[in-house]
Image (spheres, grey):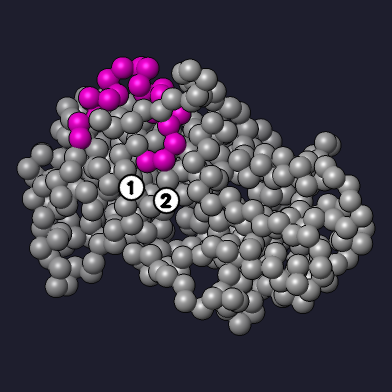
Amino acid sequence: MKNIIVGQSGGPTAVINSSVAGVYKKAKELGVKKVYGMVHGIEGFLKENIIDLDEYLDNEENFELLKRTPSAFLGSCRYKLPVVEGNEEIYEKIFELLDKYEIDTLFYIGGNDSMDTIKMLSDYAKDHNKHQLFMGVPKTIDNDLGITDHCPGYGSACKYIATSLKEIIRDNSSFGVEKPTICIVEIMGRHAGWLTAAASLCKDNDCEGVDAIYLPEVPFDLDKFLNKVKTLAKKKSSVVIAISEGIQTKDGKFVCELNDDDKKVDAFGHKQLSGSASTLANIVAKETGLKTRAIEFSTLQRAATHLASLTDINEAQMVGEKAVEEANNGKTGMMVILVRNDSEEYSCTTDIYDIHNIANVEKKIPLEWIDEKNNYMKDEYIKYAKPLIQGELLPIFKDGVVTHLVRK
């Protein structure tokens, strides 16, 4: 490889920049001359908005600071490549720019839609005799990419969710009034409840855990939910419930749409979901007269690098390095995956897999891991997720506040 370029796409994570660090580190070890970064993903690349990563990462201090920096250092985008037919000029523009900067390989760090970009570019290169290679690097707090055991970014989001819920439980139980406060916490998750399942990780010797968990994998029944709340309210002075933003009724209606059918969509045609907790809190208050509180974690769960999992950071860097290694061996149209070793002590290795079997395929939580009767997670999930939140990497502080690496 002579020169390479790396981009970031979709919703950021607490460790997405560790994958950039991994790509850069391994490329330099292999003697790659230039490591370019796309500013705002493939959309920025089409505008020839790129930077030379040597300007930022040629010293150890910045390299370590990058791994402690949240969001997408290079800038992200939600740009969807159109189908080739009728849009050949867009694809030709991409390859013209790759040729101009003598770029051999393009690495794209992202989730389902980002892997679709890798699939389309690698297919176009194959069909039009282009020499460039394309490698996908997994990233998503949603943990819904297929084949890979889990996705970098998920472990850190789990750590934040479990920690924050533990703190919310302590706060909500402070007053001990006769009538409890019903606290409903909304966690990201459109069709897959991986993030909300992490609410179960806050249960420990010093915390009784949340009282119920509602996931998109199980149809939401409003009447049963209200009965659950009423039953809990008779027994407890504090009730905390975790829900996925994408929970929906058996007829396919999102809970957040119960009071609003006019939901906007993003660049990929996905409905923008939010407000499920507020909707349910209002319904509970109206039906029961109880005091309610709605909390929406929103972007906090993907931006909390100060609470990132060291295991997650290390694996995010590892998949970046693996992508470069495999591209150096001539591989293309592939995504790096994490493979959990079959041993008592947790460890993961890396491999690669055909992007065509991953792009646009959404992996959901196995139903056998969900305790539908008690609205909770079974031990199988705890065993799966607990190792992913282990370890910490302390932030670098300046004047009492964390410091980050930012583009000039």
In the current view of this chain or complex, which residue is farthest to the bottom?
A: 251
Is the C terminus in the top left, top right, bottom left or bottom right quadrant? top left
Badge 2 marks a residue whose secondary structure is loop
Classify mark 1: residues with Cα within 10 Å, few (<14), some (14-19) or many (20+). many
Please name the residue that numbered disc 2 is placed on.
11
How far apart, in angstroms, are the residues tagged by discs 1 and 2? 7 Å
Q: Is residue 62 visible?
A: yes
- The label number, if any, that marks residue 8 in the structure image: none
Nearest the viewer among 303 and 218 is: 303
Q: Earlier in the sequence, mark 1 or mark 2?
A: 2
Q: Is residue 104 visible?
A: no
At 64% across and 76% down in the image, what residue appears? Answer: 249
Q: Would residue 53 be counted in the magenta stretch?
A: yes
At 52% across and 20% down in the image, what residue appears? Answer: 400
Residue 23 locus on image (x, y percent) = 32, 34
Q: Amino acid at mark 2?
A: Gly
Is 355 on the left-hand or right-hand side of 254? left
Which image quadrant for residue 115?
bottom left
Nearest the viewer among 162 and 275 is: 275
Residue 147 locus on image (x, y percent) = 48, 54
Tell me whether circle 1 and circle 2 mark residues in contact (CB < 8 Å).
yes
Residue 174 locus on image (x, y percent) = 83, 42
At 35% across and 21% down in the image, what residue appears? Answer: 62
Q: Amino acid at mark 1?
A: Ser
Range drawn in magenta:
51-72
Q: Is residue 129 above or below residue 55?
A: below
Residue 224 locus on image (x, y percent) = 78, 74
Is the N terminus in the top left, top right, bottom left or bottom right quadrant? top left
At 78% across and 47% down in the image, what residue appears? Answer: 172
Is 147 on the left-hand or right-hand side of 180? left
Is 141 on the left-hand or right-hand side of 43? right
Please name the residue that numbered disc 1 is placed on.
76
